[in-house]
């Protein structure tokens, strides 16, 4: 009368296995908030991945930004977030340069004499070390192909 049914051992074993599995899942969940740069990176990647010439804008809600050819970082107060581009490298463009005029909509042929000079300007912009700058209200992006030179220009 006080004996345990034979299947109760299997039930306890099954409950133990399930409990360990649930504990493993709970411990593997991230404990930090997702990076604030995620939506920004996604917008840049969408423009860069386009099979056609494309443009886009994305609002920036950060104090400072560091835009490199492979990744972006934002700083708001004491919080710094980093993200890497899936469709890099991109070309960070500084205000007042010839690439800036192309980013703003000028055809590359009106700004550069040859496709080679356009390509060289893009290479130099990508190789410039990224530095922290005051964040603009929005980033502008433009993907274009001109005489075989592909570039994704992003305002820095």
Image (cartoon, rainbow, N blue to C red):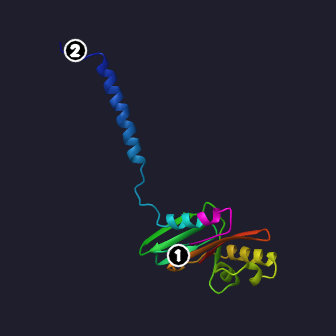
* Residue 49 magenta: yes
Nearer the N terminus, badge 2 or badge 1? 2
Neighbour tally class for label 1: few under 14, some 14-19, many 20 plus, Cα within 10 Å: many
Q: Which dot, 2 or 1, sits closer to the camera?
A: 1
SS class, disc 1:
strand
Indicate the quadrant where residue 155 lies: bottom right
Judge by depth and name the residue closer to the eye, 91 or 152: 152
Magenta run includes residue 86: no
In the rendered image, residue 84, in percent from the top left (x then y), is placed at 58, 63
Q: Nearer the viewer, residue 12 or 46?
A: 46
In the picture, measured across the screen, residue 145 lies left or right of residue 13, that is: right
**Which residue is the site of mark 1?**
65
| Residue drawn 80% across the image and 71% down it | 147
User: What mark, if any, has residue 91 been given in the picture?
Assistant: none
Q: Which residue is mark 2?
A: 3
Give the Cα distance between marks 2 and 1: 70 Å
Locate residue 69, reporting x and y percent. 64, 69
Q: Is residue 16 above or below residue 52?
A: above
Residue extending furthest toward the left: 1
Q: Quadrant of the C terminus?
A: bottom right
Residue at the image point whose x is 40% and y is 37% from the top: 21
Residue at the (49%, 79%) spot, across then down = 137
Q: Report the residue that reaches farthest toward the bottom.
A: 96
Please provide the residue range marked out in magenta.
46-56
- Say left or right for 56 vs 18: right
Q: Nearer the viewer, residue 111 or 71?
A: 111
Q: Taking 127 as reference, is 84 above or below it?
A: above
In the picture provided, is 6 more to the left or to the right than 118? left
Q: Residue at x 55, y 78 (%)?
A: 132
């Amino acid at each position: 009368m006080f004996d345990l049914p034979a299947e109760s051992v299997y039930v306890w074993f099954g409950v133990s296995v399930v409990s360990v599995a649930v504990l493993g899942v709970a411990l593997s969940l991230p404990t930090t908030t997702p990076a604030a740069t995620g939506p920004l990176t996604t917008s840049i990647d969408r423009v860069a991945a386009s099979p056609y010439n494309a443009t886009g804008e994305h609002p920036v809600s950060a104090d400072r930004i560091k835009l490199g050819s492979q990744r972006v970082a934002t700083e708001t107060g004491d919080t710094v977030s980093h993200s890497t581009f899936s469709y890099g490298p991109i070309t960070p463009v500084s205000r007042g340069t010839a690439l800036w005029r192309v980013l703003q909509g000028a055809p590359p042929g009106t700004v550069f004499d040859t496709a080679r000079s356009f390509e060289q300007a893009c290479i130099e912009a990508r190789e410039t070390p990224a530095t922290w700058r005051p964040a603009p209200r929005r980033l502008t992006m433009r993907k274009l192909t001109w005489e075989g030179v592909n570039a994704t220009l992003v305002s820095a």
